[in-house]
Amino acid sequence: MDNRYKPVIGLEIHVQLNTKTKAFCDCSAEVFDLEPNSSICPICTGHPGTLPVPSGEMFKLGIKVASALNCQINLYSRFDRKNYFYPDLPKGYQITQFFHPLAEFGWLEVNGKKVHIRRIHLEEDAGKLIHSGDSITESDYSLVDMNRCGVPLAEIVTEPDIESPEQARVFMEKLRAILRYIDASTGDMEKGAMRCDANISVVDTVTGKQSNKVEVKNMNSFKFVEKALEYEFERIIGLMENEQEVDRETRGWNLATKSTVSMRSKEEAHDYRYFPEPDIPPVLLDSEYVEKIKQSLPELPDKRLKRFMESYKLPERDAWTLVEDKQIADFFEEVVSQTKEPKETANWFLTEYFRLIGEHGEDKIHVTSRHFVELFRLMKDGKISRNMAKEVFQESALSRKMPAEIVKEKGLEQVDDSKLIEEIAKKVIENHPKEVETFRSGKEGLFGFFVGQVMKETRGKANPKVVNEILDKLLRGS
Ligand code: ADP
Ligand code: ZN
Ligand code: MG
């Protein structure tokens, strides 16, 4: 019974906001790859007697994220202390928003279904431990890098509305596209700028029983979010089938073994002894300010996707590939506005353009809308065939030269001089008397053979249309 068990999934996603400075001090928040402990100060490392001051930029970006996710924004929000001990947390508590989050009640559409956002709150990141040796259990000592302490995060908590591991991945992909569109975060999971804790429980649809939920951490790519959830789904089903208890716990994704391992039993909110942060007054937002930020948002990926599908008549997959990256989407639209051929332009983007970027890297490829316009014109005027166009496109993208220049330089110009083609065709006919005889006795299929011979003689440069006409005249006498 394949469909007997159904997964119930909810995500908690930490997003690093693109601010210049940290959440409560002036240290730079761009700390990836920095010398350890080079972007810290008494505030973000929690020295006694220092006072945190919330960053306005953090709120601005938080409001952008919340608006883009259709949330209700709370004009009154407040910070709280979440108390716990860990060596990467010098203060002994994390400043977060527990009782009064920045935003609530949002949603994001995934596969035509709304995944509800329970809340979005602002908080600071903790530091990082660097363990000696290969693994935490075998290391002799650990080093602390506090650069990430105080880096501003928005935590996005969904309702358990997600119905499959695949949907969880799509949710993450959509979310990242949005974050990048509104310039709120780089969304790079590989660099820790976006992290996902995935919660999953399983419902037995026959008995109606629902398992405890398990939280999985440490996936550093979208693919692994999906894989870890698939693994966990199967593991929980196994336990349920054997009538074993599913522990309420936090598990870690292990990349090497492609499995999850128990990290700790799940802590409860009261374990953290949350209480209002006494050093930061509540934050009161001005509704006009919030409205202004909302109005400043660009057209978001979902809306753009629908528009691409409708106005350019593109299938959803193709449209999303073009929409996902804002720069690509903007460039595509610029090109279409010049070529006026959305379908053909999309084709060139999805095949040749992306292939070149994939093979040579984005910074090596130099194409402007003028390149496309000129390339399309060369094809339309019969100057080059479609196959040649691909070669010309590649050459011009790599050399910064215009397509016409490449055509000229390489002598690629298609031969549509009918005199010349006729001469060559006559020669071909002369050299293949047997084939001519067979053709004339009714073997029409041989026509392609003659076309091929003429093309070969011209090294593919003859205009196929002209070749066809001439051969038709010479062979069929029409
Ligand atoms: P906890 O009390 O364990 O912190 P919460 O209710 O605060 O749980 O929810 C934390 C996350 O777990 C949310 O993303 C939520 O969607 C998800 N979640 C809650 N209940 C379930 C469940 N039964 N199955 C899967 N995920 C769940
Ligand atoms: Zn600092
Ligand atoms: Mg909770």
Image (tube, rainbow, N blue to C red):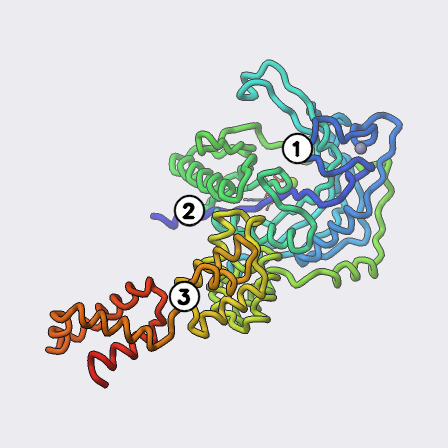
Label 3 within 8 A of ligand 1 by Cβ: no
Mark with earlier residue (2, 1): 2
Is residue 161 visible in the rendered image? The answer is no
Q: What amino acid is labelled 1 in the image? A: Asp
Q: Position of residue 359 (x, y in %)?
A: 48, 48
Q: Label 1 belongs to which residue? A: 33
Q: Which residue lies furthest to the bottom in this view?
A: 478
Give the camera-side residue of 268 and 368.
368
| Residue depicted at x 62% and y 38% | 192
Q: Position of residue 273 (x, y in %)?
A: 74, 32
Is 236 left, or right, of 199 in this rendering? left
Q: How far apart are marks 1 and 3 (CA)?
A: 46 Å
Give the camera-side residue of 423 and 232.
423
| Residue depicted at x 51% and y 65% | 404
Residue 315 higher or lower than 261, as above or below: below
Q: For residue 265, what is the image quadrant?
A: top right
| Residue depicted at x 58% and y 48% | 363
Q: Distance between the residues labelled 2 and 1?
A: 43 Å
Q: What amino acid is labelled 3 in the image? A: Arg
* Residue mark closest to the camera, 2 vs 1: 1
Q: Residues within 10 Å of mark 2 (few under 14, many from 20)?
A: many
Q: How crowded is mark 1: few (under 14 residues within 10 Å), some or many (20 or more)?
A: few
Q: Label 3 belongs to which residue? A: 386
Question: SS class of the residue under badge 2?
Answer: strand
Q: How far apart are marks 2 and 3 (CA)?
A: 51 Å
| Residue depicted at x 48% and y 39% | 228
Mark with earlier residue (2, 3): 2
Give the camera-side residue of 5 and 293.
293
Question: SS class of the residue under badge 1?
Answer: loop
**In terms of image quarters, where does ligand 1 lie?**
top right
